[in-house]
């Protein structure tokens, strides 16, 4: 991934960022833009995924990103732990700050950054090993091999993910034998094991049944006292149920960002109102 030093462009949309003291801000973007190379026919063309996005994510709150398909929700989410680095043809300008520090600064330890900012994807991706070893995996990577500590940590994380009672007698069975909803909660437990400060959730319930979706939503609400959570969702009702703040994006731009109750009941942008009332999207 390349970074540009171009000057920020004038804002095209008024971005409704809730005013917060600096000490309450966990993540921040400043004039963030992101381009990808996309194949169109026989030619590669540049596609702008994000356009001059500036917002502040509050600590220990749930923030939802909503908007139509292709609006930049997932692209924005992936900038927070440098997943965009995996695409060598992408180009980023602007800044992403974690606790006030530029995550693209020279010398940043990217694996450590990804421990601090964990990510859960749309499709559950447990490792092909036991339930126990899935949760212990990250701990072993950082040199933790004390069995008692591992046992305690595995149980603690499975309890935090509301999964312990369902798997306590199956810890040494393959994680691939769990249901989809259980696998997703196991992936969350695996992420929690390395004690992240931020948890990114990219449509974590879109492939799940309604009961499993409800459990994931309950889990998100239960974790907000410990972590900063950011969820991308195409389900506006879900955003309204689980989030404290909501950002609405359209065509890569941040149209409006406000407390969830305000954005859904009294949006300040006509475009936001049109989207949440189903006039487009």
Image: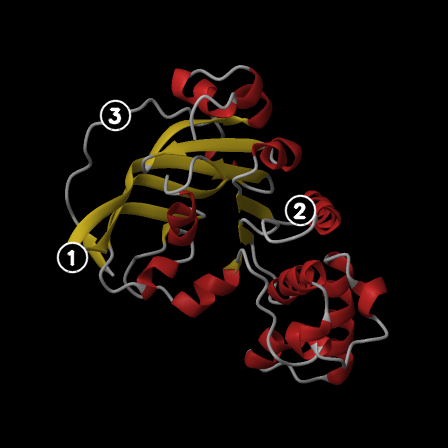
Q: Which disc, if any, is residue 136?
A: none
Residue 54 percent coordinates (x, y): 34, 35
Q: Are marks 3 and 1 in contact (CB under 8 Å)?
A: no
Q: Quadrant of the C terminus?
A: top left
Instruction: Check disc 1 and report its element: helix, strand or loop.
Output: strand
Q: Which residue is located at x 76 percent, y 80 percent?
A: 173
Instruction: Check disc 3 and report its element: helix, strand or loop.
Output: loop
Apparent side of residue 247 relative to residue 70 in the rendered image (left or right): right
Question: Quadrant of the rendered structure where residue 130 is?
Answer: bottom right
Of pointers 3 and 2, the one earlier in the residue sequence: 3
Mark 1 closeness class: few <14, some 14–19, many ≥20 residues within 10 Å: few
Question: What residue does disc 1 label?
Answer: 44
Q: Which residue is located at x 52 percent, y 32 percent?
A: 246
Q: CA distance from mark 3 to mark 2?
A: 33 Å
Q: Which residue is located at x 44 percent, y 35 percent?
A: 67
Between marks 1 and 2 in the image, the one whose residue lies nearer the viewer: 1
Question: What residue does disc 3 label?
Answer: 12
Question: What residue does disc 2 label?
Answer: 220
């Amino acid at each position: 991934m390349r970074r540009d030093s171009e000057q920020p462009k004038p804002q095209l949309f008024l971005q409704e960022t809730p005013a917060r003291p600096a000490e309450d801000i966990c993540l921040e973007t400043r004039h963030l833009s992101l381009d990808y190379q996309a194949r169109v026919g026989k030619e590669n063309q540049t596609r702008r995924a994000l356009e001059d996005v500036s917002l502040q994510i509050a600590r220990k709150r749930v923030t939802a990103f909503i908007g139509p398909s292709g609006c930049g929700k997932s692209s924005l989410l992936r900038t927070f732990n440098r997943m965009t680095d995996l695409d060598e043809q992408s180009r980023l300008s602007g800044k992403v700050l974690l606790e006030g520090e530029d995550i693209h600064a020279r010398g940043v330890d990217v694996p450590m950054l990804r421990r601090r900012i964990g990510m859960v994807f749309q499709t559950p991706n447990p490792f092909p090993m036991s339930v126990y070893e899935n949760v212990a995996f990250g701990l072993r990577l950082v040199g933790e091999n004390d069995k008692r500590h591992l046992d305690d940590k595995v149980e603690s994380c499975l309890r935090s993910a509301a999964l312990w009672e369902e798997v306590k007698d199956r810890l040494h069975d393959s994680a691939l034998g769990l249901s989809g909803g259980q696998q997703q909660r196991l992936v969350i437990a695996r992420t929690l094991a390395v004690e992240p400060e931020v948890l990114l959730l990219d449509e974590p319930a879109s492939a799940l049944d309604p009961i499993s979706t409800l459990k994931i939503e309950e889990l998100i609400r239960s974790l907000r006292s410990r972590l900063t959570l950011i969820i991308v969702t195409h389900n506006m009702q879900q955003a309204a149920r689980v989030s404290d703040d909501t950002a609405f994006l359209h065509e890569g731009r941040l149209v409006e960002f406000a407390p969830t109750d305000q954005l859904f009941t009294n949006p300040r942008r006509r475009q936001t109102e049109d989207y949440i009332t189903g006039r487009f999207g």
